[in-house]
Structure formats: structure tokens, C-alpha cells
Amino acid sequence: MQYDQKHMPAEWDAWLRNRRAEPPSETELKDNLTLSITKKENADKLALRAGKNPEEVLKHSDMSSFPVYDEYEVTPGDGSKFKS
């Protein structure tokens, strides 16, 4: 049986890995999904107020407070070791 784990709710993952005693209820799953959606909407509103596009994916090179070291890539996998 094949399934995609990355779309599994965290509550089910915790139960399947014995990190919680009881399986999640429908109410718990629905409440947590609603909270997650609300947080995403609020984060998007804050980004718009700050003049940013909420759909943009930030890379490490876009974060000014993130330390940059010569021996490490700025964005893993892109090969560049320096900010552009």
C-alpha cells in the first residue's frame, strides 16, 4: 500500500508513532485545521501590511539577520557560497 506521508495530519502521525495514546478525533482534526488556516491568513495579512508578497518563498539569502559563513552555502543546494 502506497501513500504520501507529507499530507498526513500531525495528530495521526503522532498516534501512529506511539507519541500519543489515543487516535485524534474528527473534532480535534477539524479544529486544528481551522486554526492552521487562520494562522496562514493572518500571516498573509501581516505580510501585505509590511509591503511583501505572501506568495514569495524566502531564501536564506533574503534574510538580513541570518549569519553567513564563507565555508557554507547561503541557500542549500544552489552552490553559491556568497550573497548575491
Image: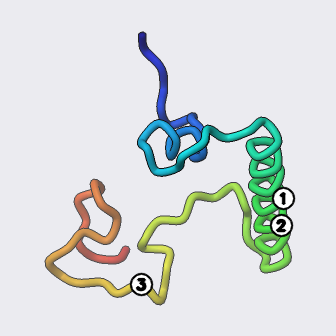
- Few, some or many residues within 10 Å of mark 2 (<14, 14–19, 20+): few
Name the residue nearer the viewer: 83 or 54.
Answer: 54
Q: Name the residue under label 3.
A: 66
Tell me which amino acid carries mark 1. Thr
Q: Which of marks 3 and 1 is nearer the N terminus?
A: 1
- Element at badge 3? loop
Name the residue nearer the viewer: 35 or 51.
Answer: 35
Say which quarter of the image contains residue 39: bottom right
In the image, what residue occupies the spot 27% across and 76% down?
82
Discs 1, 2 touching: Cβ within 8 Å: yes
Q: How far apart are marks 2 and 3 (CA)?
A: 24 Å
> Whole-percent x and y of residue 80?
25, 65
Tell me which amino acid carries mark 2. Asn
In the image, what residue occupies the spot 83% across and 67% down?
42
> Whole-percent x and y of residue 70?
18, 82
Q: How far apart are marks 3 and 1 (CA)?
A: 28 Å
- Few, some or many residues within 10 Å of mark 1 (<14, 14–19, 20+): few
Discs 3, 1 touching: Cβ within 8 Å: no
